[in-house]
Amino acid sequence: MRLAPPWVYVATAEALDDEMRARIHHHRSRRDARWRTIEAPFDLSKALIALDDSRQPIVIDCLTLWLSNILLADADIVAASDDLIAALTVASGPVVVVSNEVGLGIVPDTPLGRRFRDAQGQLNQRVAALADRVFLLAAGLPLQLK
């Protein structure tokens, strides 16, 4: 499906070090003037609700960084996830959500790592349940799951 611009890119990364600043700069340089960028490292649901009347196509990149931000801030993951699901449920335009599949590797050896992996898996399942289509990308190749 091709969607006409303008498009909205909702970024969840924070530039906390030089390497991440370089990554963010690289991502920004790939987007032209047809993109509007909104930074939402914590208040993702609030950002989506604010865009509700726009009906513009939205790309959220990515849930994995957003969830990491929530977890490391010691915020309520369940409440934040519930708020995000509610915002996605009422979104007026098409939304593409990027997330990492973190459950395919070994079980993390730290409690924080296991908590993150479990929370990410639960969030991915909830978002996938809402989605019309779900793709897994492996080696740059899309596999449609739903």
Image: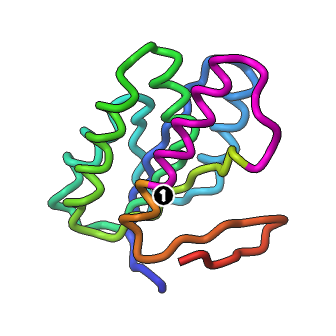
Q: Secondary structure at mark 1?
A: strand
Residue at position x 41%, y 76% in the image: 132
**In screen coordinates, is 35 left or right of 100?**
left
Q: Residue at x 45, y 25 (%)?
A: 70
Total numbered badges shown on the rendered structure: 1
Q: Residues within 10 Å of mark 1 (few under 14, many from 20)?
A: some
- Between 19 and 68, the one nearer to me in the picture: 68
What residue lies at 48% left-to-right and 58% top-to-bottom? 97
Extreme residue in the top direction: 74
Can you identify the residue that label 1 sits on?
A: 97
Give the quarter of the image for residue 115. top right
Q: Amino acid at mark 1?
A: Val
Looking at the rendering, the stretch of residues picked out in magenta corresponds to 104-125
Q: Check if residue 112 falls in the magenta segment.
A: yes
From this view, report whether residue 118 is shown above or below residue 48. Answer: above
Q: Is residue 83 magenta?
A: no
Q: Position of residue 76 (x, y in %)?
A: 35, 22
| Residue 26 in picture, x, y percent from top left | 70, 44
Percent position of residue 85, x then y: 31, 50
* Secondary structure that dominates the magenta span: helix
Q: Is residue 16 left or right of residue 81?
A: right
Above or below residue 88? Residue 25 is: above
Is 32 or 68 nearer to us in this picture?
68
